[in-house]
Image (cartoon, rainbow, N blue to C red):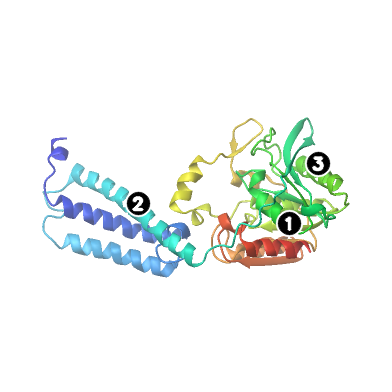
Amino acid sequence: MTRLIHMRGDITGALLFCTLLFLGIWQLVVSWKKLNGFSLTGYPDRRKLSFVFGLVLVIGACGWYLSRPGHFASPDVEGSEMLLLLVVGFLAATVIQGALASVAFRRKYLRYPPASEGERGEEPLEKLAVPVEESLVPALFGPPAGGEPTVAGVLLLHDYSGTKEDTNHIAAYLRARGHATLAVDLDGHGENPRGVISPSMEALMNEAATLLRDRSSRSEISVVGIGLGGTLAIRLAAADASVERAVALDPPTTEDGGWPTVNALRELKPIDLAAGFLRPAARSEDKGGITLSKMLVLMPPAGTAGNGVTVIGTAGTWFNSPAALRGCYGECGPGKLVLLPGRHASIASGKTTLEAILNALS
């Protein structure tokens, strides 16, 4: 303890060395794990440039520090002192990496901003309840704006850990173009009193589709889902012949056996990462948390959805990779794949995406 209080040797140099070393290691990890939100070299990350940058920092820091007197191999700074400096250096490098990544991300965001979040409907959405077995599931229904005849009813499904309100901008955009919309809280999410009994949520999907057909006065409907909601949209299109069109926005891709191939760490900016730990997980039937990965693994195989499926994903390697999305869309049956700029967190709100949804529903 005395040595820690009265630290000797080149403390400043050792701390600078540790910070630069870990900052270089951060670049290597960003390149290796495709952590686009933490990248300092691009949007998404330029992996080779990040790797070279990290390698230069690591080699340069080691070459500079080990070639000068007073480094950690000498008696001045050693043992517990060096361990403390390593910890402080790691924390400093992490803070610097997060701050620089946020600045780089923000500058790129301003240079290539996502389109507007869509149109906000002036008419409020009507609160409904979908009877599912012994429960009433909250829902939001919106008739076409201006009292126009309904072109088609559209069921809106939010993403994992989201709520029905997350689709309000899509509802406003579609309502302004003659569609009636119905958004529900998925099992285990939001105000839905039901836990996740079945990951495919067949009972909820069937009852919500029935309610939408009744309220829109049309025998055929369409369904649009974000992320996990996109997976459910594809499955509903395969199971329900009344579903004329299905649009899946960046649904999580899986490999054989149901294991997900997505990587949420690619998606997250530093602030997103901190917020992700505070976001509630889906509730299972026993009120415990259930992860997206587990839900995907437990989903039974789905049938072919037919011609009316459109998968919209990101052109860069973010939450999914384009190659994995192509495989997902191929397994859905004949349909269409649309790759757009942006990342998973913002793709649903872009004007280009909203236009692509409207084209898919036409």
Specify whether 307 is left or right of 259.
right
Q: Residue 174 carries which label?
A: 1
> Label 2: few (<14), some or many (≥20) within 10 Å?
some
- Tell which of 212 and 159 is nearer to you: 212
* Nearer the camera: disc 2 or disc 1: 1
Position in image of residue 176 (x %, y %): 74, 57
Q: Where is residue 335 in the image (x, y as percent from the top left)?
A: 75, 65
Q: What residue type is labelled 2?
A: Thr
For the residue pair 90 and 164, the one nearer the viewer reads as 164
| Numbered tag placed on residue 207 in the rendering | 3
Residue for point 34% across, 63% down: 54
Q: Distance between the residues labelled 3 and 1?
A: 22 Å
Report the disc number at residue 94.
2
Considering only order in the chain, which callout, 2 or 3, is on the residue closer to the N terminus? 2
- Residue 172 position, x and y percent, is 70, 53
Q: Given this view, does label 3 or label 1 mark the residue nearer the observer?
A: 1
Quadrant housing residue 125: top right
Residue drawn at (80%, 44%), measured in percent from left and top? 206
Disc 3 from disc 2: Cα separation: 48 Å
Q: Residue 362 carries which label?
A: none
Q: Taking the image as drawn, is residue 29 in sight?
A: no
What's the residue type where badge 1 is placed?
Answer: Leu
State how many labels appear: 3
